[in-house]
Image (cartoon, rainbow, N blue to C red):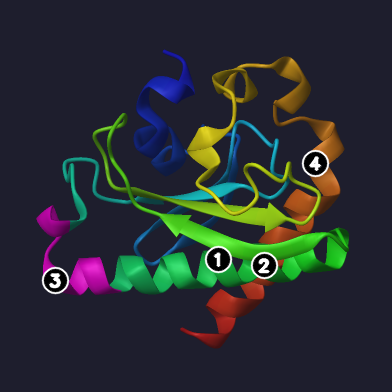
Amino acid sequence: MDWREDRIGAAARGENPTVLAETPAGYAVIGDVQFLPGYSVLLSRNPSATALAELPRDERVQYLADVDLLATAVERACRAHDAGFRRMNIEILGNTDAFVHAHVWPRYDWEPDDIVRKPVWLYDPSHWSDPAHALDARHDALRASITEELQALLAEHV
């Protein structure tokens, strides 16, 4: 089975190669695509929950706190790696994948003018499948920085 078919289970088994770190409520992963370098996702540890509201309140609050830590780590790393870093966007949608996950999108000044102030989903759909945007070794330094920042934040908040 390809790890992408069960991202949460693969993370729990140590088989998901995109895992940056475990958090109390989930698995922080770097996105499969990197047309916005640093794009990451927080997967809930609870694979049976299909919506945030299905998590018990204490798990939901912890999950949202973990999203904050991941977003902070991505922001710090992206700001240090790219002078064009602009801001962070966080989205919890669930329209395609039926498990709780939050998208953490860094946004940049160098993005096209017609998209930079709009949702990332307005990028051409080819951005999600073009090999030029796939996660690969080009992203190793940024990935390491995000992981380092997240580990430090997690250590502060234990």
* N-term mark: 3 or 4: 3
What amino acid is labelled 3 in the image?
Arg
x, y (%) of residue 146?
A: 70, 60
Residue drawn at point x = 70 percent, y = 36 percent: 35
3D distance between C-alphas at marks 2 and 4: 15 Å
Between 55 and 9, the one lying in front of the other is 55
Q: Is residue 34 visible?
A: yes
Viewed as shown, does residue 128 lie left or right of 140?
left
3D distance between C-alphas at marks 2 and 3: 27 Å
* N-term mark: 4 or 1: 1
Q: Is residue 56 magenta?
A: yes
x, y (%) of residue 32?
A: 60, 31
SS under mark 4: helix
x, y (%) of residue 77?
A: 75, 64
Between 105 and 46, the one lying in front of the other is 105
Tag 3 residue: 57
Asked if the residue at tag 1 contacts the one at tag 3, i.e. Cβ–Cβ closer than 8 Å, the answer is no
Q: Is residue 113 above or below residue 68?
A: above
Asked if the residue at tag 1 contacts the one at tag 4, i.e. Cβ–Cβ closer than 8 Å, the answer is no
Which stretch is magenta?
53-61
* N-term mark: 2 or 4: 2
Q: Could you say which quadrant of the image residue 87 lies in?
A: bottom right
Asked if the residue at tag 2 contacts the one at tag 1, i.e. Cβ–Cβ closer than 8 Å, the answer is yes
* N-term mark: 3 or 1: 3
Tag 2 residue: 75
Tag 1 residue: 71
Classify the position of the N terminus by image quarter.
top left
Residue 139 tag number? 4
Q: Is residue 16 visible?
A: no
Q: Could you say which quadrant of the image residue 155 lies in?
A: bottom right
What amino acid is labelled 2 in the image?
Glu
**Main secondary structure of the magenta stretch:** helix
